[in-house]
Image (cartoon, rainbow, N blue to C red):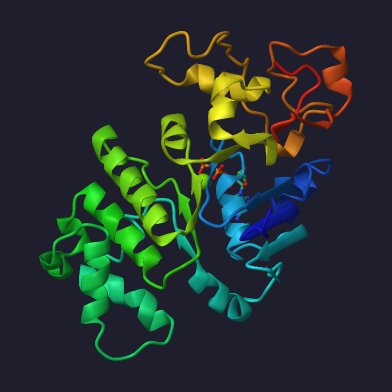
Amino acid sequence: MTAPLLAVDDVHVRFAVGGWLQALVQPGRPRSIEAVAGVSFAIARAEIFALIGESGSGKSTLARAVNGLVKPSAGRITFAGRDITGRSDAAMRPVRQAMAMMFQDPVGSLSPRLKVRSLLAEPFRIAGRTGRLEDEVQRLLALVGLPVEFADRYPHQLSGGQARRVGVARALALEPQLVIADEPTAGLDVSVQGEVLNLLRDLQQRLGISILIITHNLSVVRHIAERMAIMYLGRFVEVGETEAVFANPRHPYTLSLLSATPEPDPDAVADRIELAGEIPSLLRRPKGCELHTRCPFAQDRCAREVPPVMADPDGRRFTCHYPR
Ligand code: ATP
Ligand code: MG
Protein backbone atom coordinates (compact mmCIF):
# COMPACT_ATOMS: atom_id res chain seq x y z
CA MET A 1 0.00 0.00 0.00
CA THR A 2 1.27 3.50 -0.80
CA ALA A 3 1.65 5.90 2.12
CA PRO A 4 -1.72 7.18 3.31
CA LEU A 5 -2.55 10.87 2.98
CA LEU A 6 -3.60 11.06 6.63
CA ALA A 7 -2.53 8.76 9.44
CA VAL A 8 -3.96 9.09 12.93
CA ASP A 9 -2.09 7.02 15.47
CA ASP A 10 -3.49 6.39 18.97
CA VAL A 11 -4.78 9.96 19.36
CA HIS A 12 -6.27 11.13 22.64
CA VAL A 13 -7.97 14.47 23.36
CA ARG A 14 -8.61 15.49 26.93
CA PHE A 15 -10.73 18.45 28.07
CA ALA A 16 -10.73 20.00 31.52
CA VAL A 17 -14.24 20.09 32.98
CA GLY A 18 -15.53 22.07 35.97
CA GLY A 19 -13.60 24.74 37.85
CA TRP A 20 -12.27 24.96 41.40
CA LEU A 21 -15.77 25.51 42.80
CA GLN A 22 -16.92 22.18 41.40
CA ALA A 23 -13.78 20.53 42.74
CA LEU A 24 -14.63 21.91 46.18
CA VAL A 25 -18.24 20.73 46.09
CA GLN A 26 -17.55 17.34 44.49
CA PRO A 27 -13.96 16.42 45.40
CA GLY A 28 -14.18 12.94 43.91
CA ARG A 29 -15.39 14.10 40.51
CA PRO A 30 -12.93 13.74 37.61
CA ARG A 31 -11.36 17.03 36.51
CA SER A 32 -11.15 16.11 32.86
CA ILE A 33 -12.82 13.97 30.24
CA GLU A 34 -11.28 12.08 27.38
CA ALA A 35 -13.42 13.03 24.38
CA VAL A 36 -11.15 11.02 22.08
CA ALA A 37 -9.58 8.05 23.80
CA GLY A 38 -7.01 6.31 21.60
CA VAL A 39 -8.12 6.41 17.97
CA SER A 40 -6.09 5.10 15.03
CA PHE A 41 -6.97 5.14 11.34
CA ALA A 42 -5.59 6.15 7.97
CA ILE A 43 -7.12 7.71 4.86
CA ALA A 44 -5.67 6.95 1.44
CA ARG A 45 -5.42 9.47 -1.35
CA ALA A 46 -8.74 9.85 -3.18
CA GLU A 47 -10.59 7.89 -0.51
CA ILE A 48 -13.80 8.84 1.31
CA PHE A 49 -13.78 7.77 4.94
CA ALA A 50 -16.85 8.21 7.16
CA LEU A 51 -17.05 8.72 10.88
CA ILE A 52 -20.33 7.87 12.55
CA GLY A 53 -21.61 7.71 16.09
CA GLU A 54 -24.17 9.23 18.43
CA SER A 55 -24.04 12.84 19.53
CA GLY A 56 -21.14 13.36 21.95
CA SER A 57 -19.14 10.36 20.75
CA GLY A 58 -16.20 12.62 19.84
CA LYS A 59 -16.50 12.91 16.06
CA SER A 60 -16.07 16.69 15.81
CA THR A 61 -13.32 16.65 18.44
CA LEU A 62 -11.39 14.08 16.42
CA ALA A 63 -11.84 16.18 13.27
CA ARG A 64 -10.65 19.28 15.12
CA ALA A 65 -7.61 17.40 16.38
CA VAL A 66 -6.74 16.35 12.83
CA ASN A 67 -7.07 19.98 11.70
CA GLY A 68 -4.98 21.21 14.62
CA LEU A 69 -7.78 23.20 16.27
CA VAL A 70 -7.44 21.19 19.46
CA LYS A 71 -4.17 19.70 20.67
CA PRO A 72 -4.10 15.97 21.21
CA SER A 73 -3.02 14.99 24.72
CA ALA A 74 -1.30 11.94 23.22
CA GLY A 75 -0.79 10.21 19.90
CA ARG A 76 0.46 11.25 16.49
CA ILE A 77 -1.06 12.75 13.35
CA THR A 78 0.76 12.51 10.04
CA PHE A 79 -0.44 14.35 6.95
CA ALA A 80 1.13 14.04 3.49
CA GLY A 81 4.19 12.46 5.05
CA ARG A 82 4.73 15.12 7.74
CA ASP A 83 4.19 14.82 11.47
CA ILE A 84 1.77 17.66 12.28
CA THR A 85 0.97 16.67 15.86
CA GLY A 86 0.58 19.61 18.20
CA ARG A 87 1.76 22.20 15.65
CA SER A 88 1.20 25.85 16.48
CA ASP A 89 -1.47 27.79 14.58
CA ALA A 90 1.20 29.50 12.49
CA ALA A 91 2.83 26.19 11.63
CA MET A 92 -0.59 24.72 10.76
CA ARG A 93 -1.42 27.49 8.26
CA PRO A 94 0.23 25.90 5.21
CA VAL A 95 -1.22 22.52 6.22
CA ARG A 96 -4.74 23.96 6.43
CA GLN A 97 -4.55 24.94 2.77
CA ALA A 98 -4.10 21.29 1.94
CA MET A 99 -6.67 20.17 4.54
CA ALA A 100 -9.90 22.14 4.28
CA MET A 101 -12.51 22.00 6.99
CA MET A 102 -16.28 22.31 6.41
CA PHE A 103 -17.63 23.01 9.85
CA GLN A 104 -20.85 21.70 11.31
CA ASP A 105 -23.64 24.22 10.43
CA PRO A 106 -22.10 25.69 7.27
CA VAL A 107 -25.00 28.16 6.90
CA GLY A 108 -24.25 29.66 10.29
CA SER A 109 -20.55 29.75 9.47
CA LEU A 110 -21.13 32.00 6.42
CA SER A 111 -20.79 35.58 7.54
CA PRO A 112 -24.26 37.15 6.89
CA ARG A 113 -22.92 40.55 5.81
CA LEU A 114 -20.68 39.24 3.03
CA LYS A 115 -21.84 38.53 -0.50
CA VAL A 116 -21.04 35.14 -1.98
CA ARG A 117 -18.28 36.84 -4.01
CA SER A 118 -16.48 37.91 -0.83
CA LEU A 119 -17.16 34.60 0.89
CA LEU A 120 -15.47 32.76 -1.97
CA ALA A 121 -12.58 35.24 -2.09
CA GLU A 122 -11.99 34.94 1.65
CA PRO A 123 -9.87 31.75 1.62
CA PHE A 124 -7.53 33.34 -0.96
CA ARG A 125 -7.25 36.54 1.09
CA ILE A 126 -6.48 34.58 4.26
CA ALA A 127 -3.78 32.77 2.32
CA GLY A 128 -2.27 36.15 1.43
CA ARG A 129 -3.52 36.58 -2.15
CA THR A 130 -4.22 40.16 -3.16
CA GLY A 131 -5.76 41.73 -6.24
CA ARG A 132 -8.76 40.73 -8.30
CA LEU A 133 -10.18 37.32 -7.60
CA GLU A 134 -13.21 37.44 -9.91
CA ASP A 135 -11.87 34.62 -12.09
CA GLU A 136 -11.39 32.43 -9.03
CA VAL A 137 -14.88 33.26 -7.77
CA GLN A 138 -16.43 32.33 -11.11
CA ARG A 139 -14.39 29.15 -11.34
CA LEU A 140 -15.57 28.10 -7.87
CA LEU A 141 -19.22 28.88 -8.61
CA ALA A 142 -19.02 26.78 -11.77
CA LEU A 143 -17.29 23.97 -9.89
CA VAL A 144 -20.21 23.61 -7.45
CA GLY A 145 -22.91 24.19 -10.05
CA LEU A 146 -24.10 27.67 -9.08
CA PRO A 147 -24.88 30.36 -11.68
CA VAL A 148 -22.46 33.32 -11.83
CA GLU A 149 -25.18 35.75 -10.68
CA PHE A 150 -25.00 34.10 -7.26
CA ALA A 151 -21.80 36.05 -6.61
CA ASP A 152 -24.03 39.03 -5.74
CA ARG A 153 -26.25 37.21 -3.25
CA TYR A 154 -26.08 37.31 0.52
CA PRO A 155 -26.27 34.10 2.57
CA HIS A 156 -29.90 34.77 3.59
CA GLN A 157 -30.82 34.81 -0.11
CA LEU A 158 -29.60 31.21 -0.51
CA SER A 159 -31.52 28.00 0.06
CA GLY A 160 -30.01 25.44 2.43
CA GLY A 161 -28.61 23.44 -0.47
CA GLN A 162 -27.17 26.52 -2.19
CA ALA A 163 -25.51 27.64 1.06
CA ARG A 164 -24.00 24.17 1.37
CA ARG A 165 -22.63 24.50 -2.18
CA VAL A 166 -21.00 27.79 -1.22
CA GLY A 167 -19.49 25.99 1.79
CA VAL A 168 -18.13 23.27 -0.49
CA ALA A 169 -16.73 25.89 -2.86
CA ARG A 170 -14.97 27.68 0.00
CA ALA A 171 -13.47 24.41 1.18
CA LEU A 172 -12.15 23.66 -2.32
CA ALA A 173 -10.82 27.15 -3.01
CA LEU A 174 -7.18 26.43 -2.23
CA GLU A 175 -7.20 23.01 -3.93
CA PRO A 176 -6.91 20.90 -0.78
CA GLN A 177 -5.87 17.27 -0.77
CA LEU A 178 -8.22 16.44 2.11
CA VAL A 179 -11.64 17.90 2.93
CA ILE A 180 -13.05 17.34 6.40
CA ALA A 181 -16.83 17.66 6.15
CA ASP A 182 -18.59 17.75 9.52
CA GLU A 183 -22.28 16.92 9.00
CA PRO A 184 -22.43 18.42 5.50
CA THR A 185 -26.06 17.42 4.99
CA ALA A 186 -27.54 18.03 8.44
CA GLY A 187 -30.80 19.95 8.38
CA LEU A 188 -31.41 19.56 4.64
CA ASP A 189 -34.40 17.94 2.97
CA VAL A 190 -33.67 14.40 1.85
CA SER A 191 -33.65 15.31 -1.86
CA VAL A 192 -31.25 18.21 -1.24
CA GLN A 193 -29.04 15.95 0.92
CA GLY A 194 -28.69 13.67 -2.10
CA GLU A 195 -27.70 16.63 -4.31
CA VAL A 196 -25.00 17.79 -1.91
CA LEU A 197 -23.63 14.26 -1.54
CA ASN A 198 -23.57 13.69 -5.27
CA LEU A 199 -21.72 16.97 -5.63
CA LEU A 200 -19.15 15.93 -3.01
CA ARG A 201 -18.65 12.53 -4.57
CA ASP A 202 -18.45 13.95 -8.07
CA LEU A 203 -15.84 16.51 -7.01
CA GLN A 204 -13.92 13.87 -5.11
CA GLN A 205 -13.71 11.77 -8.26
CA ARG A 206 -12.87 14.65 -10.59
CA LEU A 207 -10.30 16.25 -8.33
CA GLY A 208 -8.92 13.09 -6.70
CA ILE A 209 -9.23 14.54 -3.22
CA SER A 210 -9.79 12.57 -0.01
CA ILE A 211 -12.77 13.28 2.23
CA LEU A 212 -13.30 12.65 5.93
CA ILE A 213 -17.07 12.88 6.31
CA ILE A 214 -18.82 12.99 9.67
CA THR A 215 -22.48 12.17 9.88
CA HIS A 216 -25.26 10.64 11.94
CA ASN A 217 -26.90 9.48 8.78
CA LEU A 218 -26.11 5.93 7.74
CA SER A 219 -27.65 6.19 4.31
CA VAL A 220 -25.24 9.07 3.68
CA VAL A 221 -22.36 6.79 4.62
CA ARG A 222 -23.52 3.99 2.39
CA HIS A 223 -24.00 6.39 -0.49
CA ILE A 224 -20.57 7.93 -0.39
CA ALA A 225 -17.90 6.30 1.79
CA GLU A 226 -15.53 3.47 0.89
CA ARG A 227 -14.65 2.83 4.52
CA MET A 228 -16.32 3.78 7.78
CA ALA A 229 -15.55 3.93 11.48
CA ILE A 230 -18.10 3.72 14.26
CA MET A 231 -17.33 5.75 17.38
CA TYR A 232 -18.59 5.23 20.91
CA LEU A 233 -17.38 7.27 23.90
CA GLY A 234 -14.36 8.53 22.00
CA ARG A 235 -13.16 5.19 20.66
CA PHE A 236 -13.63 3.23 17.45
CA VAL A 237 -15.67 0.13 18.16
CA GLU A 238 -15.58 -1.02 14.52
CA VAL A 239 -13.76 0.06 11.33
CA GLY A 240 -14.05 -1.47 7.89
CA GLU A 241 -15.17 -1.30 4.30
CA THR A 242 -18.61 0.27 4.21
CA GLU A 243 -20.34 -2.46 2.23
CA ALA A 244 -18.86 -5.20 4.40
CA VAL A 245 -19.91 -3.42 7.60
CA PHE A 246 -23.45 -2.96 6.32
CA ALA A 247 -23.65 -6.55 5.11
CA ASN A 248 -22.28 -8.05 8.31
CA PRO A 249 -21.84 -5.75 11.31
CA ARG A 250 -19.61 -7.50 13.86
CA HIS A 251 -19.94 -5.13 16.83
CA PRO A 252 -23.30 -4.98 18.68
CA TYR A 253 -23.10 -1.19 18.71
CA THR A 254 -22.80 -1.12 14.92
CA LEU A 255 -25.69 -3.54 14.71
CA SER A 256 -27.83 -1.28 16.90
CA LEU A 257 -27.09 1.75 14.70
CA LEU A 258 -27.95 -0.19 11.55
CA SER A 259 -31.10 -1.50 13.25
CA ALA A 260 -32.24 2.04 13.93
CA THR A 261 -32.03 3.19 10.29
CA PRO A 262 -35.12 2.90 8.16
CA GLU A 263 -34.19 0.31 5.53
CA PRO A 264 -36.26 -0.09 2.39
CA ASP A 265 -35.44 -3.80 2.53
CA PRO A 266 -36.75 -5.23 5.83
CA ASP A 267 -34.49 -8.28 5.65
CA ALA A 268 -31.38 -6.14 5.25
CA VAL A 269 -30.65 -6.11 8.97
CA ALA A 270 -31.31 -9.68 10.00
CA ASP A 271 -31.42 -9.46 13.77
CA ARG A 272 -32.37 -5.93 14.74
CA ILE A 273 -31.35 -4.96 18.25
CA GLU A 274 -31.99 -2.02 20.52
CA LEU A 275 -29.62 -0.82 23.21
CA ALA A 276 -30.84 -0.29 26.76
CA GLY A 277 -30.67 3.11 28.46
CA GLU A 278 -28.70 6.21 27.66
CA ILE A 279 -25.16 6.83 26.48
CA PRO A 280 -23.02 7.01 29.66
CA SER A 281 -21.28 10.21 30.77
CA LEU A 282 -17.61 10.55 29.88
CA LEU A 283 -17.12 11.38 33.56
CA ARG A 284 -18.04 7.79 34.41
CA ARG A 285 -16.80 5.45 31.73
CA PRO A 286 -18.08 1.92 32.31
CA LYS A 287 -15.42 -0.65 33.28
CA GLY A 288 -14.58 -3.55 30.98
CA CYS A 289 -16.35 -3.18 27.64
CA GLU A 290 -17.81 0.32 27.69
CA LEU A 291 -20.96 -0.87 25.93
CA HIS A 292 -21.74 -3.58 28.48
CA THR A 293 -24.24 -1.43 30.39
CA ARG A 294 -26.43 -1.23 27.28
CA CYS A 295 -25.57 -4.34 25.27
CA PRO A 296 -28.14 -7.15 24.95
CA PHE A 297 -25.35 -9.71 24.39
CA ALA A 298 -23.25 -8.74 27.42
CA GLN A 299 -21.95 -11.52 29.70
CA ASP A 300 -20.17 -11.24 33.07
CA ARG A 301 -16.78 -11.01 31.41
CA CYS A 302 -17.84 -7.85 29.50
CA ALA A 303 -18.19 -5.93 32.77
CA ARG A 304 -14.65 -6.91 33.84
CA GLU A 305 -12.37 -7.19 30.83
CA VAL A 306 -11.66 -4.63 28.14
CA PRO A 307 -12.22 -6.48 24.85
CA PRO A 308 -9.18 -6.84 22.56
CA VAL A 309 -9.06 -5.44 19.06
CA MET A 310 -10.11 -8.25 16.74
CA ALA A 311 -9.40 -8.32 13.01
CA ASP A 312 -11.19 -10.12 10.19
CA PRO A 313 -9.20 -11.35 7.19
CA ASP A 314 -10.76 -8.54 5.12
CA GLY A 315 -9.12 -5.95 7.39
CA ARG A 316 -12.15 -5.20 9.53
CA ARG A 317 -11.32 -4.28 13.13
CA PHE A 318 -13.72 -4.37 16.06
CA THR A 319 -13.51 -4.59 19.84
CA CYS A 320 -15.95 -7.07 21.34
CA HIS A 321 -15.82 -10.27 23.40
CA TYR A 322 -18.86 -11.68 21.65
CA PRO A 323 -18.93 -10.34 18.09
CA ARG A 324 -21.86 -11.11 15.80
P1 ATP B 1 -22.43 15.71 17.66
O1 ATP B 1 -22.88 14.56 16.84
O2 ATP B 1 -23.48 16.20 18.59
O3 ATP B 1 -21.80 16.81 16.86
P2 ATP B 1 -19.77 14.78 18.38
O4 ATP B 1 -19.61 13.32 18.17
O5 ATP B 1 -19.24 15.69 17.34
O6 ATP B 1 -21.30 15.11 18.66
P3 ATP B 1 -18.00 16.21 20.16
O7 ATP B 1 -18.51 17.55 19.83
O8 ATP B 1 -16.69 15.81 19.60
O9 ATP B 1 -19.09 15.10 19.79
O10 ATP B 1 -17.95 16.09 21.75
C1 ATP B 1 -17.42 14.96 22.43
C2 ATP B 1 -17.43 15.21 23.90
O11 ATP B 1 -16.47 16.21 24.23
C3 ATP B 1 -18.76 15.73 24.44
O12 ATP B 1 -18.97 15.16 25.71
C4 ATP B 1 -18.53 17.22 24.54
O13 ATP B 1 -19.33 17.77 25.55
C5 ATP B 1 -17.07 17.28 24.91
N1 ATP B 1 -16.43 18.52 24.46
C6 ATP B 1 -16.29 18.92 23.17
N2 ATP B 1 -15.61 20.08 23.10
C7 ATP B 1 -15.29 20.42 24.39
C8 ATP B 1 -14.57 21.49 24.99
N3 ATP B 1 -14.04 22.47 24.25
N4 ATP B 1 -14.46 21.50 26.35
C9 ATP B 1 -14.98 20.51 27.11
N5 ATP B 1 -15.65 19.46 26.60
C10 ATP B 1 -15.82 19.41 25.27
MG1 MG C 1 -20.06 17.11 16.13
Look at the picture and state if 180 lies above or below 92.
above
Look at the picture and state if 94 lies above or below 274.
below
Using residue 75 as the reference point, say whether residue 198 is left or right of it. left
- Residue at 40% x, 64% y is 171
47 or 96, nearer to the observer: 47
Q: Residue 164, how many percent across, how many down? A: 30, 53
Using residue 268 as the reference point, say whether residue 228 is left or right of it. right
Count all numbered tags in the image, as a single digit: 0
Q: Residue 165, how many percent across, how many down? A: 28, 55
Q: Does residue 34 appear in this view?
A: no
Quadrant of the image occupied by residue 309: top right
Q: Residue at the far bottom: name it.
A: 131
Q: Does residue 268 appear in this view?
A: yes
- Residue at 52% x, 21% y is 258
Q: Residue 125, how many percent across, how many down? A: 37, 82
Q: Residue at the far left: name it.
A: 149
Look at the picture and state if 243 lies above or below 42.
above
- Residue at 37% x, 50% y is 200
22 or 279, nearer to the observer: 279
Quarter of the C terminus within the rendering = top right
Q: Residue 238, how many percent across, how many down? A: 67, 32
